Amino acid sequence: MTIKKTKIIENPELLINAGNPKGKLGEELINDMNVNHENLAQWGVGHLDISKQSIILDIGCGGGVNVKRFLEMTENNVYGIDYSSVSVKKSIELNIEEIENKRCEIRQESVSQMSFDDNTFDIITAFETVYFWPDFSNDLNEVNRILKDDGIFMICNEAIPKENDERQKEFIELLNCSIYSKNELVSYLNNAGFSNIKTVINESKDSFTGEDSTWICVIAKKF
Ligand SMILES: C[S@@+](CC[C@H](N)C(=O)[O-])C[C@H]1O[C@@H](n2cnc3c(N)ncnc32)[C@H](O)[C@@H]1O
């Protein structure tokens, strides 16, 4: 069952779970994100060049739908990390078959300190999660570290900063998060050593409210 679009907005106790899903409400929200983020995720993934050999990591994997999608697109291994135990549990449930086949692994850890070796991944993705990363500069250095030299990092967000948007202001305060503009994302990525940074914008609708929303997909190469 999916949550009615307005329910999340009217219910701060539910919304607060977006940054770190916990307990029953966290599970409820994760189930809903798996459904409501589908259009955004498909749009973002459409900008990636995934081969059968690609080794992929999804950071802030939430309920694991993108991990599942990537398992169908590559024949190689797919990993997910998330610091929420609820997200990790949900991602494991959804991908249990390939976890048992040793082709998939979900780890509970923070983007700020990941347990992967340097130069591990061909593709790393971050859907709707960088808003919550605690130290964006350091966290991007950490992403850069575990990417292979010709690796690709993709950020996919359904929000950019909007002046005079009271709801967005409330959201940022409630969740203690950051919503980045296109220029900010490019600048952070440049400073972390990424290059060939491309941005794509889509004027669309918010996954939960259905209101006008600007989606942004940023794709960067390690070198
Ligand atoms: C809004 S949800 C998005 C989930 C999923 N990527 C999607 O698009 O449906 C944000 C997720 O990022 C995770 N997250 C936030 N900050 C994180 C961090 N510092 N390290 C790891 N995961 C983080 C949260 O626990 C949550 O599962």
Image: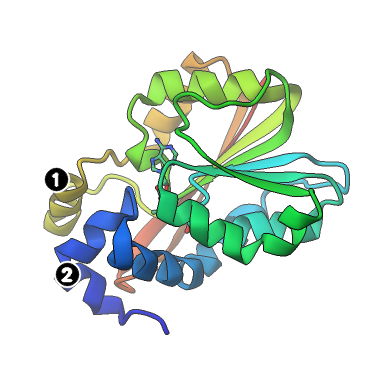
Locate the N terminus and report the quarter of the image it occupies: bottom left
Mark 2 residue element: loop
Q: Quadrant of residue 150?
A: top right
Residue 43 seen in render: no
Q: Position of residue 75 (x, y in %)?
A: 86, 51
Mark 1 residue element: helix
> What amino acid is at disc 1?
Glu
Q: Quadrant of residue 15?
A: bottom left
Q: Position of residue 176 (x, y in %)?
A: 20, 41
Count of picture labels: 2
- The disc, 2 or 1, on the residue closer to the chain's N-terminal end is 2
Locate the C terminus and report the quarter of the image it occupies: top right
Q: Nearer the viewer, residue 138 or 182?
A: 138
Q: Nearer the viewer, residue 55 or 109?
A: 109
Q: Left of 93 or right of it: where is 72?
A: right
Which residue does the numbered mark 2 point to in the structure image?
Answer: 11
Q: Left of 179 or right of it: where is 199?
A: right
| Residue at left offset 74%, top offset 23% | 148
**Real-space Cα separation, disc 2 to disc 1, in angstroms:** 15 Å
Circle 2 Cα neighbour tier, 10 Å, few/some/many (<14 / 14–19 / ≥20)? few
Using the image, tell me which numbered label, if any, was put on residue 198.
Answer: none
Observer-side mark, 2 or 1, equals 2
Which residue does the numbered mark 1 point to in the structure image?
Answer: 173
| Residue at left offset 24%, top offset 77% | 6
| Residue at left offset 82%, top offset 51% | 74
Q: Is residue 204 above or below residue 58?
A: below
Residue 154 seen in render: yes
For the residue with label 2, is its CB less than 8 Å from the closest atom of ligand 1? no
> What amino acid is at disc 2?
Asn
| Residue at left offset 19%, top offset 53% | 171
